[in-house]
Amino acid sequence: MKALFLTLSLLLTVPTLLNAQFLNAYQWKSRLVLLFTPTVNDPLFLKQMSLLAERSKDFEERDVIFIAINPDGKYENTGRFLDASLSRQYYQHFSPSENQFEMILVGLDSNEKLRARNTVTPPSVLLELIDGMPMRRQESLQGYGNKSQLDGGK
């Protein structure tokens, strides 16, 4: 009976582990801001991208990578969106609605930290949340990622 339970447990967790392997490239290296949008012209997506771009140096200091994703990879040729195969993996793993804008913050541990649906989130909210994370506090104490303090703001 124990062997059956163990086998069943492994069968249920292996697909989850396999589905999340695409995140391994970022784990412990980068925080992610995933921007799921139904179309390239979605007004919420465009506004969110504009606001995030204004604070790009702050996000760069915190090792944040932005990934734009649409349901079918339709806009991959623009260089701004993932291809269809990777888009599917992100949609399957995070389960956002395909018909609305969603932004998800993923921490260094590859776990979801914040999800905002059909709204524009001020960059300050993301930055404060990141700065409150234990790993970011440790980075700050060690001087990692504090370019403004280390090199006189250059």
Image (cartoon, rainbow, N blue to C red):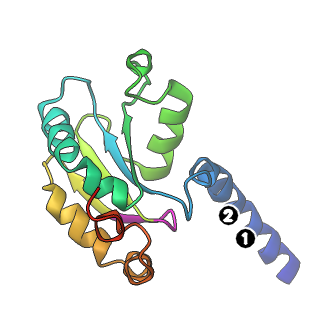
Label 1 SS: helix
Nearest the eye: 55 or 119: 55
Which amino acid does the dot numbered 1 rest on? Ser
Please indicate, yes or no, whether residue 1 appears anywhere in the rendered image: no
Which residue is found at the position 13% from the left and 48% from the top?
120
Determine the image quadrant of residue 35.
Answer: top left
Nearest the eye: 140 or 6: 140
Which residue is found at the position 36% from the left and 30% from the top?
70
Which residue is found at the position 80% from the left and 75% from the top?
6
Quadrant location of the N terminus in the rendered image? bottom right
Please indicate, yes or no, whether residue 103 appears anywhere in the rendered image: yes
Count residues near mark 2 (Cα–Cα under 10 Å), then give few for <14, some for 14-19, many for 20+.
Answer: few
Residue 147: x and y, percent? 35, 63
Determine the image quadrant of residue 15.
Answer: bottom right
103 sits to left or right of 110: left
Quadrant location of the C terminus in the rendered image? bottom left
From the image, state whether disc 1 or disc 2 is nearer to you.
2
Q: Which numbered dot is residue 40?
A: none
Q: Which numbered dot is residue 13?
A: 2
Labels 1 & 2 near each other (Cβ < 8 A): yes
Which amino acid does the dot numbered 2 rest on? Thr
Which residue is found at the position 16% from the left and 38% from the top?
50
Residue lying farthest to the top in this orientation: 77
Q: Circle 1 is placed at which residue position?
A: 9
Please give the range of residues in magenta.
Answer: 108-113
Vertical order, 69 against 15 (above or below)? above
